[in-house]
């Protein structure tokens, strides 16, 4: 685990393997005060010479002095509009670089920083230092590089050092958990594995946990969820985690799609790239990560996390196109495409959420490829029954550096999911695929305001992003945490 601390900008006596200086697109050299004069001159020179311009994600390494600041890593933030977002991104780049290069320690300097900025830098550093090496044999001892194990944020006052670091670490725990769960392959991260993870979170943070299996779901009449699960011998799991530290405040429910693998089922997906569908549980990972972070932050709130988990497989027992199933709220569904399985799982989980009388329900799901066509990888699709809460989620996403963008959830689109034989069909074809998926979910929402996050384009990346490698991004942990923190008052 990465050791994090913060303190004043004591550049004079600084001893560190590496000092990262995070800089906005440069106009002049930064004030480096008491930093070793020779190093400060070098920094000034690369800036004056325009060897380093401070454009976003730009880096330059300068060698320092043995026994003092051994290296200086300049990291550009470009033209900054959102300072916390920029600091976090640059800190992530710095930590990732330090880790790759085998610097055991890293000090980060970005001038004077508030507690909130310390939190952002800490979070960025944790994200950047994260890696997943569980299944690779480490190189021989003499070829190994030191892992980055210590990060110090400079320029903080006492409050920044205390609160900023604590909060950054708490949210970082959540992120790290979500990214790890996402990265684990489908043969390891099964519905039971997610249930065990929930039990572990519950145990460490004094939450209660309920896990439903096939039999319990049958008793609840969850024919929609179970139709997806009927193609796999694995036990499906509906996982409920209850964090109740909010006295008599109303419940916030967080719901996540937990498809441990999505082959498409009988409507099977093309082989090319199918391995990415192990990430079809990123909504579930987001819920578990957020529960971890919310508990670590000790927020005075009542939050119920719900995860619907199974694996979508073709088999002799699998559900078929044309089949009609009944969800626990009584509605019938004609299954047009077995690859539109996430909504079938979530239908019963959303109906189940009603029993907690939630003040609001947010769900996150890698639900539609169409969302990637609409918004690319830059924004989560946000839709809901209440404009104000949609906006609240978008604002939470901004704070978390997890941009979200609203799509219209107009009733007119419901035409597309009208069935000739059942109450609704599970696919409306390609037009407005993200919206019709959300409208399908809405059929199972009752008695609470609800916002749906389609994270298909944002929960993981197939390419290296710069601050983060290819793989899970941690989305939607930050959005969930900021939303709940906002409601904590
Ligand atoms: N898990 C997929 C959505 C997805 C696709 C996420 C690509 C991330 C990347 C979902 O279960 C799915 O297959 N959706 C279908 C719906 C269609 C059959 C109506 C899709 O998007 O093609
Ligand atoms: Mn699918
Ligand atoms: Zn899916």
Image (cartoon, rainbow, N blue to C red):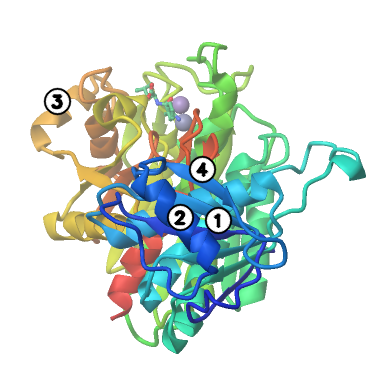
Closer to the camera: disc 4 or disc 2?
2
Residue 316 in the figure: left or right of residue 20: right
Q: Earlier in the sequence, mark 3 or mark 2?
A: 2
Residue 287 in the figure: left or right of residue 418: right
Q: Earlier in the sequence, mark 1 or mark 2?
A: 2
Closer to the camera: disc 1 or disc 2?
2
Residue 43's disc is 2
How many angstroms separate mark 3 from mark 2 (CA)? Answer: 62 Å
Residue 415's disc is 3
Looking at the rendering, the quadrant in which ligand 1 lies is top left
Q: Which residue is mark 4?
A: 468
- Mark 1 touching mark 2, by CB under 8 A? yes
* Nearer to us in this view, 127 or 279: 127
Measured as percent of width and height from the top left, residue 213 is found at: 62, 49
- Mark 3 touching mark 2, by CB under 8 A? no
Helix, strand or loop at label 2? It is: helix
Q: Which residue is mark 1?
A: 72
Residue 360's disc is none
How many angstroms separate mark 1 from mark 2 (CA)? Answer: 8 Å
Q: Earlier in the sequence, mark 1 or mark 3?
A: 1
Q: Can residue 313 be seen?
A: no
Give residue 207's quadrant in the image.
bottom right
Q: Earlier in the sequence, mark 4 or mark 2?
A: 2
């Amino acid at each position: 685990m990465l050791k994090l601390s913060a303190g004043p900008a004591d550049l004079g006596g600084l001893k560190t393997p590496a000092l990262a200086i995070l800089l906005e697109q440069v106009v002049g050299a930064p004030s480096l005060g008491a930093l070793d004069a020779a190093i400060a001159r070098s920094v000034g020179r690369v800036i004056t010479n325009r060897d380093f311009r401070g454009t976003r994600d730009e880096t330059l390494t300068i060698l320092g002095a043995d026994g003092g600041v051994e290296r200086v890593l300049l990291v550009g933030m470009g033209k900054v509009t959102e300072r916390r977002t920029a600091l976090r991104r640059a800190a992530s780049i710095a930590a990732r670089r330090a880790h790759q290069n085998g610097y055991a320690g890293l000090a980060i300097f970005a001038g004077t920083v508030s507690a909130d900025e310390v939190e952002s830098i800490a979070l960025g550093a944790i994200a950047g230092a994260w890696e997943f090496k569980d299944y690779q044999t480490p190189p021989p001892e003499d070829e190994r590089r030191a892992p980055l194990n210590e990060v110090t944020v400079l320029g903080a006052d006492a409050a920044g050092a205390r609160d900023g670091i604590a909060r950054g670490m708490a949210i970082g725990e959540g992120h790290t958990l979500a990214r790890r769960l996402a990265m684990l392959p489908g043969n390891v991260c099964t519905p039971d594995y997610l249930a065990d993870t929930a039990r572990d979170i519950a145990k460490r943070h004094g939450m209660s946990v309920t896990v439903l299996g096939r039999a319990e779901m049958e008793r609840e009449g969850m024919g929609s969820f179970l139709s997806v699960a009927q193609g796999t011998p694995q036990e499906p799991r509906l996982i409920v985690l209850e964090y109740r530290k909010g006295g008599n405040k109303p419940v916030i429910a967080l719901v996540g799609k937990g498809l441990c693998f999505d082959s498409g089922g009988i409507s099977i997906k093309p082989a090319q790239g199918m391995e990415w569908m192990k990430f079809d549980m990123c909504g579930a990972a987001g819920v578990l990560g957020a529960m971890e972070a919310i508990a670590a932050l000790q927020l005075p709130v009542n939050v119920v996390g719900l995860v619907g988990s199974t694996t979508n497989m073709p088999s002799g027992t699998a559900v078929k196109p044309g089949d009609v199933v009944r969800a626990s709220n009584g509605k019938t569904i004609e299954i047009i495409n077995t690859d539109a399985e996430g909504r079938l799982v979530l239908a019963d989980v959303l109906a189940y959420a009603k029993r907690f009388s939630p003040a609001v329900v947010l769900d996150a799901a890698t639900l539609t490829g169409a969302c990637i066509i609409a918004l690319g990888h830059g924004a989560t699709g946000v839709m809901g029954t209440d404009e104000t809460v949609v906006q609240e989620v978008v604002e939470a996403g901004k704070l978390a550096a997890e941009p979200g963008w609203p799509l219209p959830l107009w009733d007119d689109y419901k035409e597309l999911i009208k069935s000739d034989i059942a109450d609704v069909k599970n696919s409306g074809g390609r037009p407005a695929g993200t919206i019709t998926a959300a409208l399908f979910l809405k059929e199972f929402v009752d008695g609470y305001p609800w916002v749906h996050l389609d994270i298909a384009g944002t929960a993981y990346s197939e390419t290296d992003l710069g601050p983060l490698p290819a793989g899970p991004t941690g989305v939607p942990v930050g959005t969930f945490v900021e939303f709940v923190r906002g409601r904590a008052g």
